[in-house]
């Protein structure tokens, strides 16, 4: 038996996996599995294989349901709730089975399995195989802002949750039969209770980091730390600094307008025009280098949290649309714009998911 495996879909997931390993105080014993479905990990894969944090590193060619043509009829709305639920039961089992040939490890050989985003195919696979696992929230307090389990299953949720509890269908975030528990940062901010929620504040994991652990994190996530420091030094010109956190919002044209407006509206601090830095999101494909030529662009190949580890780094203002800024330590002022801001750029029902539950 192996000790632990972490199934990660984003850089943030890997970051939390590292924090959990450090907190355990164990040297080795963990496997890292990186899904290629929604994130490009790039050169970090090779660095992870060399890092002492994990014993083994695997890439997972996870497939969305749209990859399998035979699943399409099972997702078609029949107009009849009973027929739809029968189709969903078949869909969940078939989707899990189809995923099997792409999974690179034997999960039955691991004592503890940690899964970020069990709404993704890996959740269906583990449910199909009847393998128990621990779920972890996708992002910091993400359920507070978007309860995907309840939104995806709005309408007769209690009935669907009971079916998931019996193992007939799969529902993410603590409602599935084979989910042991669902780890979240702060239970108190969550509107709807779930008996499987367990609280582990991320602050507890970060505040105990040692200097050597911080160095290991920077070595893992930042391909060229000197280049990053050089870019950050560009902002040290005696002027106030604005850091904008990019996100894969809307279509590219609307996204461009969003960040142009943010820079226009928040780029003056204490009466002075600020030096603008943009931290690109890993899944954001907008060409910021070409559009914002006067800004310093920090690429998306490392998680935002790495900036917390750089000694002496400080920005006057950080602005985010939906990225939760609570964990940021490197800013004097943090602005989270949220739904009211996004109402200007797209129909509210697109992003106000919790209100539709």
Image: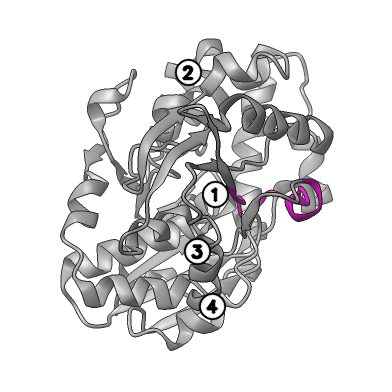
Residue 195's image quarter? Answer: top left
Task: Indicate which disc, 1 or 2, sits on the residue closer to the N terminus.
Answer: 1
> Does any portion of residue 174 appear in the rendered image?
no
Task: Indicate which disc, 4 or 3, sits on the residue closer to the N terminus.
Answer: 4
Residue 38's image quarter? Answer: bottom right
Depth order, front residue of 347/255: 255
Bin the neighbour count of mark 2 within 10 Å (Cα to Cα): few under 14, some 14-19, many 20 and up: some
Report the number of discs. 4
What residue span does the magenta drawing correspond to? 277-291
Q: Mark 1 points at which residue?
A: 124
Q: Give the CA distance from mark 4 to mark 1.
A: 37 Å
Instruction: For mark 4, give the secondary structure.
Output: loop
Which of the two marks, 2 or 3, is nearer to us in this view? 3
| Side of 344 relative to 156 (left or right) | right
Q: Residue at left 27%, top 82%? A: 28
Q: Mark 3 points at which residue?
A: 233
* Disc 4 and disc 2 in contact, CB within 8 angstroms: no
| Side of 15 relative to 118 (left or right) | left
Instruction: For mark 2, give the secondary structure.
Output: helix
Instruction: For mark 3, give the secondary structure.
Output: helix
Task: Indicate which disc, 4 or 1, sits on the residue closer to the N terminus.
Answer: 1
Q: Mark 2 points at which residue?
A: 157
Q: Mark 4 points at which residue?
A: 224
Bin the neighbour count of mark 1 within 10 Å (Cα to Cα): few under 14, some 14-19, many 20 and up: many
């Amino acid at each position: 038996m192996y000790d632990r495996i972490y199934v990660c879909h984003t850089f943030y997931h890997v970051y939390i996996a590292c924090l959990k390993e450090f907190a355990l105080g164990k040297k080795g014993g963990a496997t890292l599995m990186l899904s290629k479905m929604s994130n490009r990990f790039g050169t970090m894969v090779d660095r992870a294989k060399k890092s002492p944090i994990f014993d083994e590193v695997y890439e997972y060619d996870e497939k969305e349901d749209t990859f399998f043509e035979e699943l399409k009829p099972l997702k078609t709305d029949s107009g009849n709730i009973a027929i739809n639920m029968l189709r969903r039961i078949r869909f969940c089992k078939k989707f899990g089975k189809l995923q099997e040939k792409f999974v690179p490890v034997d999960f039955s050989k691991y004592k503890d399995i940690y899964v970020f985003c069990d709404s993704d195919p890996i959740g269906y696979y583990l449910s199909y195989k009847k393998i128990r696992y621990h779920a972890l929230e996708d992002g910091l307090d993400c359920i507070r802002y978007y309860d995907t389990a309840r939104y995806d299953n709005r309408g007769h949720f209690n009935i669907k949750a009971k079916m998931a509890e019996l193992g007939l269908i799969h529902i993410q975030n603590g409602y599935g039969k084979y989910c042991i528990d669902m780890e979240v940062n702060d239970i108190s901010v969550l509107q709807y209770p779930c008996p499987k929620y367990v609280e582990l504040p991320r602050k507890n994991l970060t505040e105990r980091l040692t200097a050597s652990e911080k160095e290991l994190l920077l070595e893992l996530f930042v391909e060229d730390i000197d280049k990053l420091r050089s870019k950050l030094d560009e902002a040290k010109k005696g002027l106030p600094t604005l850091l904008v956190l990019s996100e894969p919002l809307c279509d590219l044209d609307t996204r461009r307008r969003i960040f142009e407006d943010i820079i226009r509206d928040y780029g003056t601090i204490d009466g002075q025009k600020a030096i603008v830095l943009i931290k690109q999101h890993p899944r954001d494909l907008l060409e910021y280098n070409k559009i914002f030529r006067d800004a310093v662009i920090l690429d998306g190949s490392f998680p935002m949290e790495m900036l917390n580890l750089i000694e002496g780094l400080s920005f006057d203002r950080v602005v985010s649309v939906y990225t939760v800024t609570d964990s940021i330590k490197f800013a004097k002022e943090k602005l989270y714009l949220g739904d009211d801001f996004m109402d200007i750029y797209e129909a509210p029902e697109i992003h106000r998911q919790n209100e539709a539950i």
